[in-house]
Amino acid sequence: METTEKTITLVLADDHGIVREGIAAFCSTRPELKILGQTSDGADAVDLILALKPDFAVLDLNMPKLSGLDVVRRIRQSKSETKLIILSISRDENVIRELFRSGANGYLLKDGPARHLFDAINYILDGGQYLTPLIRREAIDIKVDKADPLTLLSKREYEVFSFLVDGMRPKDIAKLLDISPKTVDTYRANIMRKLEIDGIAGLVRFAIQRNLQSNSMPC
């Protein structure tokens, strides 16, 4: 990484403390990098990113409360300009493709060399999307799909969508989100209209095809 006068700020999110602290220690060897905050779960990661507005967030793919994919979607729906780098052990091409389609800027493997994080930051700052060289870029085809119908969903619609495809009943969703069952039905109708899908079974098939169910998300 070339020396720069500009401080580059980061938020780290990983439910394994030893991994998170190791990344922080490694970043401390570079004077241009500054860690603004750390957390162990996805929901807190969203709050930290929106509150602290870091240049980068390094996110574990599988975290409590919200997965790395869910964090990416929520941050992109918020219009935040924070660059998002996913860190995982997964080499699943469908998952990686979905992450980039949803707005991730980089993808690193946990068993890769630490210097890949610096390479990713530089590459992303230059306007690129960084995929670890340990995975063939051609196999992923990480061009962003501007026509992705999920980008049409509002933040609340995506929340309802996520709960529905994970098998939660509408009345339980209403209780969790502190809204009326009728409002949940309205969100569900909007979701199906925007995604051009009929019925919950169709939503579930859509989610499975794109590896969007939280209980199927790899580490």
Image: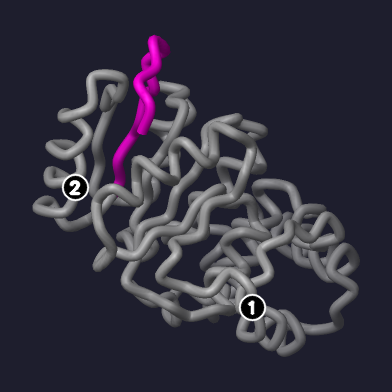
Residue at screen point 80% across, 62% down:
148
Q: Which residue is mark 2?
A: 20
Considering the image in quadrants, where does the N terminus appear?
top left
Q: Residue furthest top?
A: 5
Which SS class for mark 1?
loop
Which SS class for mark 2?
helix
Residue at screen point 39% across, 17% down:
4
Relative to 133, residue 10 above or below: above
Residue 165 falls in image quadrant: bottom right
Q: What is the crowding at mark 2: few (fewer than 14 residues within 10 Å), some, or many (at least 20)? A: many
Q: Which residue is mark 1?
A: 210
**163 vs 24, nearest the viewer:** 24
Is residue 191 shown in magenta?
no
Relative to 111, residue 186 above or below: above
**C-alpha span from label 2 to label 1:** 28 Å
Tell me the mark number nearer the camera, choosing from 2 and 1.
Answer: 2
Q: Which residues are magenta?
A: 1-13
Considering the image in quadrants, where does the C terminus appear?
bottom left
Amino acid at pointer 1: Arg
In the rendered image, is residue 168 in sight?
Answer: no
Amino acid at pointer 2: Arg
Residue at screen point 66% across, 85% down:
209
How many labels sit on residues? 2
**58 vs 172, nearest the viewer:** 58
Q: What is the crowding at mark 1: few (fewer than 14 residues within 10 Å), some, or many (at least 20)? A: some
Q: Position of residue 7 (x, y in %)?
A: 37, 15
Residue 215 falls in image quadrant: bottom left
Q: Position of residue 97 (x, y in %)?
A: 61, 69
Disc 2 or 1, which lies upstream in sequence?
2
Relative to 93, residue 63 above or below: above
